[in-house]
Amino acid sequence: MKNLLFPLTIVLFFTTIAIAQDLEYTVANIPAELKENANAVIRLDQKNIVISSRKSMIMTNKRIVTVLNENGLSYMGLYEYFSGRERVKSIEAQFYNAFGKEIKKVKRKDFKENSVSEGSIITDNKLLHYDYTPTEYPFTVVFSSETETSNTAFIPRWYPVPGFFVSIEKANLNVKVAADLGFKYKEFNIPDNSNITKEVKADGVTFTATNLTAYKREDYAPAFNSYAPNVIMGLDYFHLEGVDGVATNWKDFGAWVYSNLLKGTNEIPLETQNKIKALVGDEKDPLKKARIVYKYVQDKTRYISIQLGIGGWKPMLAKDVDRLGYGDCKALTNYTKALLEVVNVPSYYTIIYGDSQKRDLIQDFVSIQGNHVILVVPVDNKLHWLECTSQKSPFGFQGDFTDNRLALVIKPEGGEIIRTKEYPTQENTQISKGNYTIDENGNISGNILIKSKGTQYDNKFMYENSSNDDLTKFYKKYFWNIGNLKIKKMNLLNNKEDIEFSEDIALEAADYGKINNGKMIFVINAYNQLSNVPQRYRQRTSSIEMERGYYDYDEITIDLPKGAGIEAKPDNVNIKSEFGEYKTELVVINESQIIYKRTFQSNPGLYDKKDYENFRKFREQIAKNDNAKIVLVKN
């Protein structure tokens, strides 16, 4: 009897295991609330990080992701990066259909290896990846990997929810660190989240997140990491590409950067030294000398990103930049700094996050941060910030790539956190003055001079060297509300001294005014309409952020057809809100000429999500009034 039952028991046992495995990957098991607004559901994201010494970090990952549709493919994450000091010990993946049945298994030999270097980026980083083309949706992928590195300067930031339109069934982070390395971490948007637990251990920490629903992407929302849960981690005593480092405080960390990454890289060939001294001549003003040096660098060099070994963090030698004529942000900044030293102008290498969306270095978390380097020149208690990678930026102009954020200034005695230049609303101006004529057939012809400063200058000055074809396309899009548009003249002037960009445009178009039953109707604001009305949300989930304010003023003289009279015209408008102010005024000079004045100021700020509908209505009112029409009749 025993001999008959034993095989049956074995069969039932393994059948039970198989069914359990199938159920684990069955799409039907996903809770309904996790499918809402989701393109993918991360069933499990298990990350284990073990840092046993200053030169050893091993990371193991297991991720189970159900991809619900094509838009969720980016969350498969079937890749690992590696380089000289980083290796992929293991990597594999399995794929299952909606019912949990395995449809494909992928071993390491099936993954492709590619260099990350491309175009102007030179790096020794490589990518091990697998490209999967699904034949049906939904499906589930199980991805496992293990990596090892001697670089402990960077512990990957943990985002249990890695982006928009993806939900989390379970995410677990387990970190174990040798006691003498000074492990530290900082939580964001976690303490008040009941779906995330934390367990502090003597040798590390564990975070567990369960049932986190998907975030929707919303207009005018702050940066994702400002409201999504995440954890940043680091060590006081780390290792980077063969060099030991310390990050106990910003002063000591800055001193380490100076001594280990910058010191000894500033040698300039004698021939170039003499050339720079000759260009500067007898000039004594340090700011004028700095301008001369900056122009020399812009004329001589071009940007190429170089991220080879510690060269990803240490600038290439200034003498090599001088010889080759190219470098990345570190190299070009260091080269400019070295040239300024030749003519006795002090300047400081500065680490920062460069992006149009503002991002501060985290002031109370000392670690290697930032993705960009700029130069600061202090003169007469004023800081002048130089973007050394640009061949076109005016001297001292940052624009929205590095404005108003905390950066780390590196001095021989150590590091110092400083905020870069802020561009207040009243400095971000677009002032437009011009005219247009409407003839008796509704045709329009006119001229407009637009002068832009501050961040509005930043949006335009790169058009200086654009082709006529590209400019024509740009202005047809800019004056989108004028159909049948022909651009007759485009004169652009980039005043780098005053940091002002001027656009002198002449245009014409047929049938701008629509004629019906002896009346002509046309939109009074021909040149600067704000048409974008923020999307309406049934339930807004995120705050509203306007990172930068700006100010527009338009004054346009309008010549009407002879013999025409004004039957109806827009009322003057003045709309005030915490989000800004909008004002229009129509001045009738005589029966054939009127002046249209428009002012719009958008205020920067972070606003509560409950105010979103008021913000939307404010913008809706502006769009409505920008589209206001005038009606003419024959006298």
Image: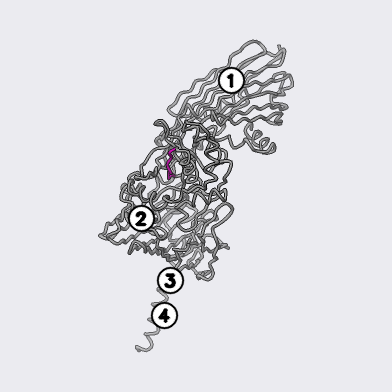
* Residue furthest to the right: 441
Tell me which corner region of the image, top left, top right, bottom left or bottom right, holds residue 541: top left
Q: Name the residue that disc number 1 marks.
A: 555
Could you tell me residue 264's position as x and y percent? Answer: 43, 51
For marks 3 and 1, give the one nearer the viewer: 1
Q: Amino acid at mark 2?
A: Gly
Q: Quadrant of the C terminus?
A: top right
Q: Residue at x 28, y 57 (%)?
A: 199
| First in residue order: circle 3 vs circle 2 | 3
The magenta stretch is 345-352
C-alpha distance separating marks 4 and 2 = 57 Å
Dot 3 falls on a residue whose secondary structure is helix
Residue 407: x and y, percent? 40, 42
- Numbered tag placed on residue 245 in the rendering: 2
Locate residue 488, reporting x and y percent.
Answer: 71, 29
> At 59% across and 53% down in the image, what residue appears?
119
Quadrant in the rendering for residue 555: top right
Evaluate if marks 4 and 2 touch, with contact meaning CB atoms under 8 Å apart.
no
Q: Nearer the viewer, mark 3 or mark 2?
A: 2
Q: Residues within 10 Å of mark 2 (few under 14, many from 20)?
A: many
Question: What secondary structure is the magenta-colored segment mainly?
Answer: strand
Disc 1 from disc 4: Cα separation: 86 Å
Q: Which residue does the numbered mark 4 point to in the structure image?
A: 11
Query: Image check: 400 left or right of 587?
Result: left
Q: What amino acid type is highlighted by mark number 1?
A: Glu
Badge 3: few (under 14), some or many (20 or more) residues near its Cα, within 10 Å? few
On screen, residue 263 versus residue 573, left or right, reads left
In this picture, residue 219 sits left or right of residue 171: right
Secondary structure state at the residue bearing disc 1: strand
**What residue lies at 53% left-to-right and 69% top-to-bottom?**
104
